[in-house]
Amino acid sequence: MSRLHTERHLVSRVGWLRAAVLGANDGIVSTASLILGVAAASAARADIVVAGIAGLVAGAMSMAAGEYVSVSSQSDTEQADLARESAELASQPELEREELAHFYVKRGVEITLARQVADQLMAKDALAAHARDELGISDFSTARPIQAALTSAATFSVGAAMPLILVLFAPAKSLTIMVSLGSLIFLGVLGAVGARVGGANIMRATLRVTFWGAFAMALTAGIGALVGKAV
């Protein structure tokens, strides 16, 4: 009996990893930008802290709701396609069998063998076979709204807490500099960890998140300074 060769593919992490990286990145960037914008308007430390906490809570709730709604829409579409496919399998199984075999032929399988494969797969689980090969729906890609919502909210809160902690301990004169540099370091670490977990290029991911984070913070701080002078 041959020994099975087991593998662990990184694509299995794509669902929660996307939500986690998005949530933490948004938490750091939006909260740090909010803090810098308020600080640039010459606000007191207490006002900055209140604004940061409000941004953390509102952002976490917004991330959770947004992820849940968007991923639920994907899930609804998947379920509608599966229901239609199930009805077609019940009403015209032979046409569905030929359709499935055709997908294997396009991948290079000889037609007779393709039909045999289609027969065997449909005998085991016809809907699963068509979901995977016709619709592109698999266990890895299936939408999970609750998982995405909870992951995004939790990681947003963790990311947002980072610049808030810096505000509490940074000297008043260097608050803006410490929040800016600290947030960029947090973003760099986040980019590196996300790339490492996902098997991507660490340097490219780190530079990408730090560049756009710096851009967002600089823009917000500039607007805050202009508004502060105008008011």
Image (cartoon, rainbow, N blue to C red):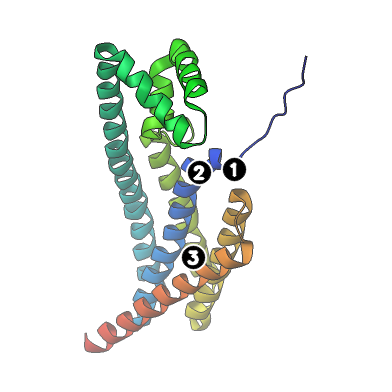
Residue 44 in view, yes or no: no
Disc 1/disc 3 C-alpha distance (Å):
31 Å
Disc 1/disc 2 C-alpha distance (Å):
7 Å
Q: Of tags 1 and 3, which is closer to the observer?
A: 1
Residue type, numbered disc 3: Pro
Residue at 55% of width from left, 70% of height from top?
207
Q: Nearer the viewer, residue 203 or 182?
A: 203
Mark nearer the N terminus (3 vs 2): 2
* Residue 157 position in % (x across, y down): 44, 51
Q: Nearer the viewer, residue 230 or 91?
A: 91
Q: Callout 2 environment at 10 Å: few (<14), some (14 to 19), or many (20+)?
A: some
Residue type, numbered disc 2: Val
Dot 2 corresponds to which residue? 14
Dots 1, 3 in contact, CB < 8 A: no
Residue at 58% of width from left, 67% of height from top?
204
Image-quadrant location for residue 151: top left
Residue at 50% of width from left, 84% of height from top?
173
Dots 1, 2 in contact, CB < 8 A: yes
Dots 3, 2 in contact, CB < 8 A: no
* Residue 167 position in % (x across, y down): 48, 69
Q: Nearer the viewer, residue 136 or 74?
A: 136
Disc 3/disc 2 C-alpha distance (Å):
27 Å
Mark nearer the N terminus (1 vs 3): 1
Dot 3 corresponds to which residue? 163
| Label of residue 10 in the image | 1
**Vertical position of residue 190 compared to residue 133: above or below:** below
Image-quadrant location for residue 192: bottom right
- SS category of the residue bearing label 3: helix
